C-alpha cells in the first residue's frame, strides 16, 4: 500500500524537462519537512511552516490522501487517462518523497508498468533514500531529479544529505540531474560551497537551480539572484512555470 495525494495532467514546470506535457502522480508522506522554505499553513488549528507541497508532506493531511492497495486499479485508470490524452506523456512521480515507497510491491508494479510502456518516468526526490537497484531494476530506466535540500531548508545536514543514496542514483540510472532550490540569502552566503560539496559525489550530473517560493510574489523576490548565480557558475536556471502561470502548487 502507498498513499497518493493527487494525480493530474499538466506541463512539467521545473528542471531539465520543463515545458514537457506530463502526467503527475503525487505521493503522500516525506522524511523531511523543510521549515526553512517558509510556506505558512494551518492544520488542526496549528500554524506551521514547510515546503510548497506541505499538503503532501505533513501526515496531518493523511486523512485526505488516497490509499493505493491494488496497483492494477491505478494502472487501468492511467491507461484510460492516456487514451483520453491521445498519446503517452511523460510521467512525473513526485511528493512528498516518492522513494519512501520504492520497495513497496504495489508502487513498484506501477513504476514497472510505466517503464514497460517506454514512458519517460521522472522521480522528483530529495535523494535521501538508498535504492536497491539490483532487486528493483526498473528504476535503472527512470530519470531522477535530485532535489537535494541545502541549509536554507533548516533540516540537519546529516538528515538531508545521504551520500550513499546520491551516488547509487547517479551511477545506476539512465539519467539524473541535480536541482537545487535557492534563496537570495543563501546565494549571498554558502550556496555555491554547499552545491560544490554535493557535486563532488557525482560531478558528471547537470546542475539546475531554481528560486524558492510557493507563489509568484515569493519567487519574484529570489529569481533575479538565482538567474545571476547560474550565469556566474555555469549552472542551468530552472523557473517554476506552474507557479508563474497558476500562482499555486496543487493540482497544476
Image (tube, rainbow, N blue to C red):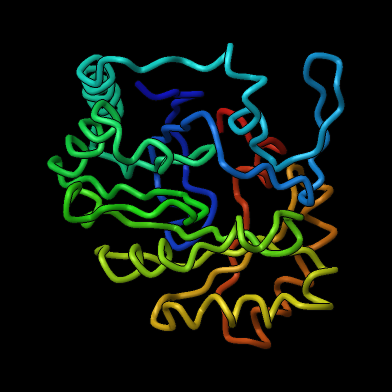
Is 86 in front, or is 208?
208
Q: Residue furthest left?
A: 116
113 shown above or below 186 = above
Measured as percent of width and height from the top left, residue 178 is found at 49, 67
Is 118 in front, or is 167?
167
Measured as percent of width and height from the top left, residue 135 is found at 17, 48
- Picture quarter with the N terminus: top left
Measured as percent of width and height from the top left, residue 147 is found at 54, 58
Residue positioned 56% across, 61% down in the render: 148
175 shown above or below 39 = below
182 shown above or below 119 = below
- Picture quarter with the C terminus: top right
- 107 lies left or right of 208: left
- 245 lies left or right of 9: right
Residue positioned 30% across, 47% down in the render: 121
Res 8 → quadrant: top left
Res 209 → quadrant: bottom right
Residue positioned 74% across, 40% down in the render: 50
Residue positioned 76% across, 50% down in the render: 37
- 200 lies left or right of 117: right
160 shown above or below 91 = below
- 115 lies left or right of 228: left
Measured as percent of width and height from the top left, residue 97 is found at 50, 41
Label total for image: 0
Amino acid at each position: 500500500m502507498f498513499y497518493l495525494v493527487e494525480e493530474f495532467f499538466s506541463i512539467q514546470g521545473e528542471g531539465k524537462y520543463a515545458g514537457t506535457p506530463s502526467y503527475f502522480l503525487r505521493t503522500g508522506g516525506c522524511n523531511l519537512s523543510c521549515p526553512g522554505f517558509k510556506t505558512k499553513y494551518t492544520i488542526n488549528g496549528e500554524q506551521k511552516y514547510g515546503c510548497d507541497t506541505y499538503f503532501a508532506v505533513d501526515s496531518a493531511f493523511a486523512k485526505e490522501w488516497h490509499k493505493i492497495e491494488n496497483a492494477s486499479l491505478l494502472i487501468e485508470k492511467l491507461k484510460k487517462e492516456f487514451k483520453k490524452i491521445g498519446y503517452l506523456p511523460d510521467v512525473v512521480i513526485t511528493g512528498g518523497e516518492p522513494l519512501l515507497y520504492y520497495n513497496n510491491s504495489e508502487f513498484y508494479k506501477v513504476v514497472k508498468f510505466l517503464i514497460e510502456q517506454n514512458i519517460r518516468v521522472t522521480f522528483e526526490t530529495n535523494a535521501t533514500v538508498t535504492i536497491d537497484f539490483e532487486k528493483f531494476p526498473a528504476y535503472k530506466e527512470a530519470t531522477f531529479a535530485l532535489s537535494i535540500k541545502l541549509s536554507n531548508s533548516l533540516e540537519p545536514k546529516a538528515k538531508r544529505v545521504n551520500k550513499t543514496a546520491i551516488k547509487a542514483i547517479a551511477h545506476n540510472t539512465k539519467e539524473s540531474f541535480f536541482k537545487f532550490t535557492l534563496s537570495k540569502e543563501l546565494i549571498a552566503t554558502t550556496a555555491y560551497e554547499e552545491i560544490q560539496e554535493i557535486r563532488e559525489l557525482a560531478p558528471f550530473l547537470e546542475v539546475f537551480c531554481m528560486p524558492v517560493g510557493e507563489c509568484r510574489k515569493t519567487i519574484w523576490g529570489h529569481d533575479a539572484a538565482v538567474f545571476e548565480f547560474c550565469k556566474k557558475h555555469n549552472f542551468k536556471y530552472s523557473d517554476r512555470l506552474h507557479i508563474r502561470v497558476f500562482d499555486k502548487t496543487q493540482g497544476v
